[in-house]
Amino acid sequence: MDRHELDKYMIRFRAGDESAFEVIYNETQRGLFSFVLSICKNYHTAEDMLQNTYIKMRAGIAGYEPGSNALAWLFTIAKNLTLNELQKRKKEVYTDFDLGSLENEKKFEGEPVSSPLLDIIMDNLSPSEAQIVLLHLVSGYKHREIADMTKKPLGTVLWSYRNAVGKLKKIIEKEDAR
Amino acid sequence: MNFGEFTKNLKSEFENRLPDVFERVKNSPTYPVAPQFQKENPKSVKSLRFVIAACAVVIFILAAMVPVILYSPKTTSPGLAFIELTVEALGDDGAAASASSDEKLMIGLVTAGGEIAAVHANEAGRILLSNENLVGLKVKTALGRIAALTRAMGYTGVGYTGAEKSAKALVVSVAGSDKKTALAVKADAEQGAAEYFFLNKVPAVVVTGDLDKEKLVERARQFDPNADITMSVAKLTEILRDNRAFLSSEVMLAYHDSDALHEMKELYRRKMFAVLATKTENFIDEVYHGDRDAAFARVIALLNEYYQKASAGNAYINGKNVKTDALKAGDIVDNIVGILNTVEGYQSAAEKEAFISFAVGFRECLRGITEDFSVKCIEGKRVIAAYGDVGFAFLEHLGNLVELTSFEDMMHYVESEFFEIVDTFDNSLFADAVAEKDKDAYLAGLEKVVTLNYIEVKKQAEISISSTITVIMEWDSLDDYYAWANAILSSAQN
């Protein structure tokens, strides 16, 4: 579903059409979940953040401006909620998402992702790289869309993606060699 | 397991772990509160609605009276949109350069037509504007005038009464209740900012007032989690400035000459991309009658043909063989049209003409981009974006990970393929690395170039490192970068 179509559903939902929410949810949950997961790297926290994002979105739907980028709006809500959560827990986490340097970002304490391939991504890629890889490979967004949603330059997104894929390939090769 | 299988398994693993919060969200007590309330207490809701409506009317009347009270002579003027244009001057330290209780140098009231209707200036602003009347001027012109005055006063005239701070940046913000007009004024202000940067070398920050304080806060929070909504715009921009933040297309932050230069190049590049997009549309419409897929297929076919020719050693630019001779970026940029002229698979003269026209747009676009090769700017973190495309093209080349699923992808493919040529032949230092498909050697080559640039620059002039070096790595901090650069310099000098 492209952004214009999503916008139509947002407008419908804003007008009170509850069925539109289900469509919006189904269209965006993968992207949002991978997005928040890449920030907090903790399954349960990500789940909470996903839930809170939709709750906040529903509560604030009146403030949605028709014609604007609904995905970017949702991602901003998700990012702010997750960062606030990080703040609340007083964990030291870089929040410089646009300029990189996230290598040292720490994970939340608690249960990690606990899924072999997702763990490979979370353990070996920076949050920014993990975010782009998940949004692209898992959620199927195009690089240009990711750049739009995450407010990063396209070149940076592409660069990060290629870097990440390079890293993953090396890891896969190593695993295969074992 | 290859990467394809990894991706497939990852998708399935992700799907299995994807939480379903739909029901929980729907049943969340935070929503829908109002409908439930309405059902149980319809009378209360009605009376509540009445009270809200009455309050709204009162507020509306009061709000309408405010401009009447404040700007009574102007309210009779049709089209006054109450757009505020605020100008602040920031000093070296990011704090306001005008030491006044009122930090704003001036606040202008702008008409719906984009003209200054009234100006309120603080003491420093009045000194600056002593003989100037901005009323009636377009925003762009007014900003140009302000910048020229700032420059004429040696950048230091803005500070006063002992403060004597030099103004390193003008912060221009636009706010207003009429969003459409505010955006138009903002565009005008941005244009003015861009022009006066070039004309007067005064760095500038343009923010879009009412809609952007939030954005500034959000952005600043990325750098400083404690950034407070109650902070002044100056404080927020200070945080951003200290972090060398770049505020996307909505906000132009150009507080440093080199950064501003880069920013200008970005704008130029975007503009050129717009030209390219137009050319592309024409190409599709004129020759392929709007059939994007057909156009897409032809572009790929033509590119393939060119690459076959090039890899067979039969493509020349400026008399140099693109396979065996080292080419300069300029050779490529100036000869994109020439390259396309060497392609022989055009189906008709019209197709060739349209494709060449497309290439002209592309060449201009590429020129805007490749100038980044020599942009002597950018501190560590920023550079990754500048080199992102180039690096990407190289990695794409190595990994052969071309994705061509849409017209947009195709556009990007074209872009990166040309980058690849530029990149590959730009410097002989990379030739071996490229031939061996050795990324590490390639990066080492780039680093070598960086080092050479650095030494050369240091020899030529005592210019600050940050504004003169092109680097390729992402540094954790500027200090790390300086340490690295200094180490390289001392080892070279020894």
Image (tube, coloured by chain):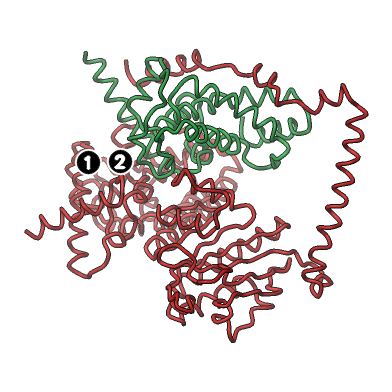
Chain colours: A green, B red
Residue nearest the viewer, comparing A92 with B435: A92
Chain of the residue displaying label 2: B
CA separation, marks 1 and 2? 8 Å
Name which residue type carries label 1.
Val
Quick check: B329 above or below A90? below
Query: Is the N terminus of chain A in the top left, top right, bottom left or bottom right quadrant?
Result: top right
User: Label 1 crowding class (10 Å Cα cut-off): few <14, some 14-19, many 20+?
Assistant: some
Q: Name the residue: 53% across, 48% down.
A: B228
Say left or right for B365 vs B374: right
Image quadrant of residue B19?
Answer: top right
Q: Name the residue: 59% across, 62% down.
A: B173
Residue farthest toward the left in the current orientation of the protein: B494
Q: Name the residue: 50% across, 23% down.
A: A45
Q: Secondary structure at mark 2?
A: helix
Name which residue type carries label 2.
Phe
Ranked by sequence position, the earlier of labels 1 and 2 is 2
Query: Is the C terminus of chain A in the top left, top right, bottom left or bottom right quadrant?
Result: top left
Q: How many numbered dots are placed on residues in this image?
A: 2
Say left or right for B65 vs B408: right
Instruction: Find disc 2 in the rendering and name its residue.
Output: B394
Residue A149 in percent (x, y) is at 53, 38
Instruction: Find disc 1 in the rendering and name its residue.
Output: B434
Asked if the residue at tag 2 contacts the one at tag 1, i.e. Cβ–Cβ closer than 8 Å, the answer is: yes
Whether callout 1 and callout 2 share a subunit is answered: yes
Image quadrant of residue B155?
Answer: bottom left
